[in-house]
Amino acid sequence: MPYQTKKPYFTLAVLVAVICYLPCCQPGKSPEIAKIDQSGKLNPWTNLDWNNDPTNFQFVIVTDRTGGERPGIFEEGVEKVNLLQPEFVMSVGDLIQGYTEDVDQIKSQWEEFDEFVSRLEMPFFYVAGNHDITNQVMEDIWKERLGATYYHFVYHNVLFLCLNSEEGLDAHRSSFFSEQQRSYVKETLAANPEVRWTMVFLHKPVWLAEERSDDHKQEVEKSGWKEIESMLQGRKHTVFAGHIHRYTHRERSNSDYITLATTGGGSKLGGPVFGQFDHVMWVTMTEEGPIMANLLLEGIWDEDFSREDVEKYLKMNLQRKAVRIESHLDDDKPLINESIDIRLVNSHEVPMTVTVSFDKSEHISFSPEKVEKVIPPNAVEKVTVQLQVEGQPGQGTKDDTEWSKLWEELDEMPARWEITYDFEDYGKIAINGSASVL
C-alpha cells in the first residue's frame, strides 16, 4: 500500500521508579492517564509506548444506500456506527432514491434520510451521488436543503475535499466537474499547501473508466477529472468513491484510490472475493498516513446478542449461500428434458429445515413443485428438480418466435424458500427469501 503506515509510539515518562503516568492534556486538570507498577525487572507487557498521539483521529465512511435499496440495512449501519464511536462520518453519495422531478417525493426522501442520520451521535457529511442529483429539480432541492454541492474542511491538519461528480445531471452515463468546481479545487489546494494529507470524496470512480476503452478514456478527459487529478500530484492523498456497488482498490500516482461497496444499496452480496458486501470503512489518520479497515456490518455487534440480532444475521448470511440454484440450462438448446440442481447449505450447529417452492407459468412448471428437507448441522445436500415445458410451443426450436418468451417466463420464476432453525437460546427463527432459477 502506498505510504506504508506504522503505528506511532511515544515515550511514557517514568516517575519515582515504580509509578509512571502522563498528565491529562485538558487545561486545568491533571489526573493520571496511565498508572502501572514497574517495580520488577521483568514485566508482562511489551512496552509502555502508548498508541495515543492526540493528533491521530478516526472517522467512518458509509457508502451507497440506494440503487436497488434493501430496506433496513442503512439504518442498521447507523446503529453500528454509533457502537464504533468515530469522531465523524463521511459519505460517497447515493443517499436517496431520486430519479424523479416530483418535488414532494424528493423532499419526502430527503426527510427520511435526514431522520436516519439524525440518529448518529457524531457529525455526518453529505456527498452528492447520481441518485441525489439526477436532474435540475433535484439539484435545486439539494441547494435549498444543504447549500453547496461541493465543499471542504480541515480537521487536525488533514484536508477533506468533497466533490460533486454529478454536475452534468447525466445520471449513470458520465461524470462532469464544471470549470467553477475545478477552480474551487485549485484555490482550495493552493490555500492548504502544508496539510499532512488530503482526503478526496466523490461518487463516481471516474478513473475506472480509463481501464475500459478509448471512448471511455475520452469521456474521462471531457469530464474535467484529469485536471483535478493533476492538481493532486505531489501531495499525499487518498480518493474514495462509490457508485459501482463493488469494492475496488487501485494505486495511482503512489496513492490509494478506493471504491466502496454498499451500505444497503443493490448487491448480489457475493462476498469479499467479488467485492460485494455491506460495510463501512474505519479510517485511522496517523502521522504517516491513513490506516483503513473494512468492517462488514454483519461483524459489528453490541455487548448483547438479542433474538432480533440473530434474525438480522441470518437474513444476511442465508441470502448469500443457504439455497443455491445450480442451473446448467443453455439458451442455445431447447428446454426439453432439462433440470436444475438446488444446493442446500447448513453452516450452523443445529438442523436446518428448508422448504423450496416454484411457481407455475403459462408453459413452464417444475417437478416436484415443492422440496422439503431437514439438513443436518454443518452439512450440504443437493436436490434435482425437473423442468417441464407444457405444450412445447414451436417444438422448442430456437427459430420459433416463442423461444424468447420461454426464457422470459423462466427468468420470472424464482425459487422461493423458507428456512427454519430451532435455537436453544432464541427458539424457532424462520427466514424467507428467493433465488433466481437462471
Image: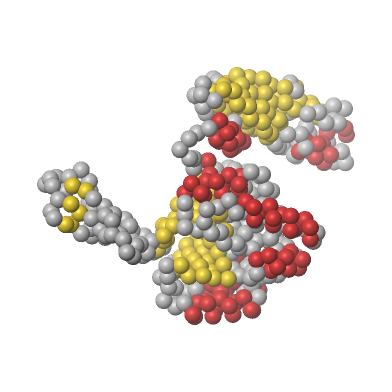
Residue nearer the viewer, 219 or 75? 75
Q: Position of residue 87 (x, y in %)?
A: 47, 58
Foreground residue among 385 and 435: 435
Instruction: Say if 217 sits above or below 247 in the image.
Output: below
- Residue 15 visible: yes
**Whole-percent x, y for residue 303 in the image:** 45, 38
Vertical side of 241 occupied by 377: above or below: above
In which quadrant is the N terminus drawn?
Answer: bottom left
- Residue depicted at x 18% and y 52%: 19
Residue situated in front as seen by the camera: 184 or 394: 184
Q: Is residue 379 visible?
A: no
Image x and y of residue 257, in percent: 51, 62
Q: Nearer the viewer, residue 391 or 147?
A: 147
The quarter holding residue 178 reads bottom right
Against 423, is 253 above or below?
Answer: below
Residue name at image x 48 percent, y 40 percent: 302
Mark count: 0
